[in-house]
Image: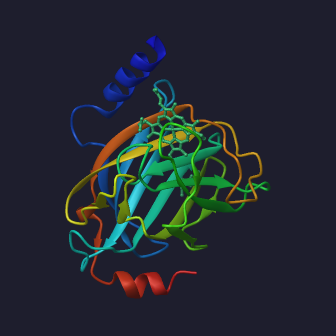
Amino acid sequence: MYWTVWTFLSVLMLRGASADNERLFQDPDTKLSFWQSYEPYKLDNGKGIIFRTAVPEAATSGTAFDVVMQMVVPNEVGWAGLGWGGGMPQNPLLVVFRNSNNQGVLASSRWANGHTTPNAYTGATYTVYKTGTKVNSTHWQVTAKCTGCATWTQRDGKKVYLNPKGNNRFGWAYSLKKPTNPNSATSAIPIHDLGQYFTMDVGKGVNKDFANLVSKLQ
Ligand code: HEM
Ligand SMILES: *[C@@H]1O[C@H](CO)[C@@H](O)[C@H](O)[C@H]1NC(C)=O
């Protein structure tokens, strides 16, 4: 409990009260415009994960649309995750990790009905692009398109939509431990070291030429 409260306060202090952690990122690799949020997980050494989203300008509220997600993750992280609907249960979960030679990155689609190990989720599919997916001495980065992450149905039948024009609350998580079989997208994964939330304005990562730019990604 102390640890949880301490972590929560630390993360709040790191993030500050303003939206300083949010900014526009014009990606030289994919040529997409992303809106990004930096989520620190450690107080002492400035370690954190960057989450970026790019959406089509034509996307409207209450409809399905593709989203390109880019994440920049410190090398010490075994897996990193995103909850598209603001938490862990009842929303599409994205889990990303490096393969066994640490050069490739896999994206895995999952779903949890509660705070228990998520299962594979076929309602969302991810296409990882070589463009914008890379590894260096400090970080790994992944760029993936999600089809099926802008709308989903909860267990009670309620249909939920991502808002392409404004703020959305996301859940995020990370573990320093790697998945059991990092060459398989359906590998078992260990529980996270931290599960948290952030809100960011997806509408600021808007792309007029989304379909055309995405069609050029490899
Ligand atoms: C691998 C098996 C997993 C287990 C056993 C698990 C279990 C849990 C538990 C017990 C909590 C509540 C923590 C607390 O009481 O403070 C929690 C919170 C959370 N988890 Fe997981 N988790 C798993 C995987 C994931 C994944 C893959 C993601 C995201 C992709 C995720 C995202 C979150 C988030 C955002 C929270 C905090 C917000 C919330 O409670 O919804 N978890 N998890
Ligand atoms: C390593 O890659 C990350 C993600 O692309 C980038 O932000 C960072 O500047 C790179 N660092 C070095 C030392 O090249």
Q: Is residue 131 visible?
A: yes
From the viewer's side, name the closer residue of 117 and 142: 117
The reply, left or right, for residue 54 in relation to residue 43 is: left
210 is higher (above) or lower (below) than 167? below
The structure residue drawn at horizontal position 52% and vertical position 81%, both measured from the top left corner, is 217
Instruction: Specify the quadrant that holds the N terminus.
Output: top left
Residue at the outermost front position: 156
Question: Is 113 left, or right, of 119 in this rendering?
Answer: left
Query: What is the x, y in percent for residue 164?
Result: 25, 66
Q: Residue at x 51, y 55 (%)?
A: 94
Residue 191 screen position, x and y as percent: 61, 36
| Res. 148 image quadrant | bottom left
Q: Is residue 83 above or below residue 26?
A: above
Residue at 55%, 47% (x, y): give it: 80
| Count of marks overlaid on the render | 0
> Which residue is at a point 34% across and 52% down the rendered structure image?
156
Q: Position of residue 96 (x, y in %)?
A: 59, 54
Residue 74 appears in the figure:
no
| Left or right: 77 in relation to 35 | right
Quadrant including the C terminus:
bottom right
Q: What color scheme is it?
A: rainbow
User: Where residue 32 sits in the image (x, y, percent)?
Assistant: 39, 73
Instruction: Spot the residue most to the top.
Output: 2
Q: Quadrant of residue 175?
A: top right
Relative to residue 78, is residue 124 drawn left or right?
A: left
